């Protein structure tokens, strides 16, 4: 039976564990809004297409939104987002739609291929032609790696890749790095005494997990913040990381080590990023059942844990009430990061840059 105490809630308490407030990050970045203009009418397909200085300004705008969300309610008024999710999603779809709604825009949402002309054999190129007439921006998630490329040939409005099969998930990687910079803003101040590169453990299969693939690409834009990346995966997994992925990291100057013993390196890690699910075709596969994190794991005292969610047995709920839990902050911050990105893509950044 539910008690009276259980039906009450206290909003004075934080929504997430960890110091999720972004004002220190705001102070660490000098505003240069002109850099954001290059995002206007630009497709966001891969982390490879992003620019470090643009990302930094995007993180600042996200921190601005998160620091004072009540100040921004109408930048996207009159704009329409087409939210096309042909693969199941909770956080990504809802955070994009929440971001757009919070800024005053309207949404047309598609969550099932069978409800569209695709079920009748319509091509994605023709779908894209229709989208040009109906909206101002598209967010697409699809189980197929090729879908996003098929659509961009016909699109005359910007599109965001919200996950295309096992390929990439660029805005997840943006949200991941935004969380890391909120946790330690000094990483953006390489000349300060507080600057110290971090050791990062990435538990997952880069060749199969789009979140891991995009995160590793993201670190190539910020090699100075990384002391070392430890790639951890079950040694029974074949071709877990490609030579191309390793070469991209090494060419950027990122030191990479590969291992299979999590607890052996966990006491050294500042950031632990763990994932276990990869979408393959119309279903998913689970990897790394031998890797599990809990409140009893041998973390550094100030280490943080990130996870793109949804989680399974690899991430114990015993961590939820510990200072290591930054995965809820990660999910929360994704809304503000996507607010910032969407504002820029539909040419509305100038309406918010001067708001304090």
Image: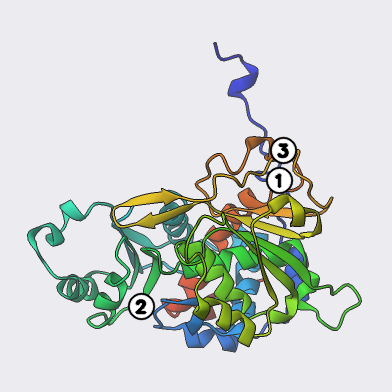
Q: Name the mark nearer the viewer: 3 or 2.
A: 3
What residue is rendered at 25% in x and 75% in y?
A: 151
Distance, label 1 to label 3, CA atoms, is 7 Å
| Circle on res. 85 | none
Determine the residue located farthest toward the right in the rendered image. 193
What residue is rendered at 55% in x and 67% in y?
A: 173
On the rendered structure, is 156 left or right of 355? left
Q: Residues within 10 Å of mark 3 (few under 14, many from 20)?
A: few
Quadrant location of the N terminus?
top right
Distance, label 3 to label 2, CA atoms, is 40 Å
Is the residue 109 above or below the residue 130 in the image?
above
- Quadrant of res 144: bottom left
**N-term-proximal mark, 2 vs 1:** 1
Tell me the residue that label 3 is attached to. Answer: 321
Q: Residues within 10 Å of mark 2 (few under 14, many from 20)?
A: many
Q: Secondary structure at mark 3?
A: loop
Distance, label 2 to label 1, CA atoms, is 35 Å
**N-term-proximal mark, 1 vs 3:** 1
Determine the residue located farthest toward the top in the rendered image. 1
Image x and y of residue 344, in percent:
49, 77
Image x and y of residue 247, in percent:
57, 83
| Circle on res. 17 | 1
Q: Residues within 10 Å of mark 1 (few under 14, many from 20)?
A: some
Image x and y of residue 170, in percent:
48, 70
Residues at marks 1 and 3 touching, judged by CB atoms closer than 8 Å: yes
Asked whether 23 or 188 is in front, the reply is 188
Residue 19, visible in the rendered structure: no
**N-term-proximal mark, 3 vs 2:** 2
Tell me the residue that label 2 is attached to. Answer: 158
């Amino acid at each position: 039976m539910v008690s009276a105490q259980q039906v009450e809630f206290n909003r004075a308490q934080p929504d997430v564990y960890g110091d999720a407030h972004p004002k220190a990050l705001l102070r660490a970045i000098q505003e240069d809004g002109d850099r954001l203009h290059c995002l206007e009418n630009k497709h966001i397909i891969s982390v490879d297409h992003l620019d470090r200085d643009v990302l930094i300004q995007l993180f600042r705008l996200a921190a601005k939104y998160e620091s004072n969300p009540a100040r921004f309610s109408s930048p996207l008024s009159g704009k329409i987002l087409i939210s096309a999710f042909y693969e199941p999603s909770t956080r990504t779809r809802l955070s994009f739609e929440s971001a757009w709604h919070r800024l005053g825009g309207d949404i047309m949402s598609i969550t099932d291929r069978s409800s569209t002309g695709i079920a009748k054999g319509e091509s994605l190129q023709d779908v894209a032609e229709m989208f040009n007439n109906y909206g101002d921006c598209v967010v697409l998630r699809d189980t197929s790696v090729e879908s996003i490329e098929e659509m961009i040939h016909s699109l005359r409005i910007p599109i965001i890749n919200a996950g295309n099969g096992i390929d990439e998930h660029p805005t997840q990687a943006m949200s991941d790095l935004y969380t890391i910079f909120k946790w330690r803003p000094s990483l953006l101040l390489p000349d300060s005494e507080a600057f110290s590169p971090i050791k990062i453990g990435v538990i997952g299969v880069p060749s199969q997990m789009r979140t891991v693939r995009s995160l590793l690409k993201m670190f190539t834009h910020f090699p100075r913040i990384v002391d070392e990346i430890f790639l951890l995966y079950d040694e029974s997994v074949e071709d877990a990381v490609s030579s191309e992925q390793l070469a991209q990291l090494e060419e950027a100057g990122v030191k990479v080590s590969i291992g299979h013993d999590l607890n052996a390196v966990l006491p050294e890690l500042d950031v632990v990023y763990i994932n276990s699910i990869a979408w393959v075709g119309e279903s998913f596969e689970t990897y790394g059942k031998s890797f599990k994190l809990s409140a009893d794991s041998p973390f550094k005292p100030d280490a943080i844990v990130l996870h793109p969610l949804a989680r399974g047995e690899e991430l114990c709920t015993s961590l939820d009430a510990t200072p290591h839990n930054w995965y809820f902050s990660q999910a929360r911050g994704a809304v503000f990061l996507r607010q910032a990105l969407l504002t820029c893509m539909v040419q509305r950044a100038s309406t918010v840059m001067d708001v304090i």
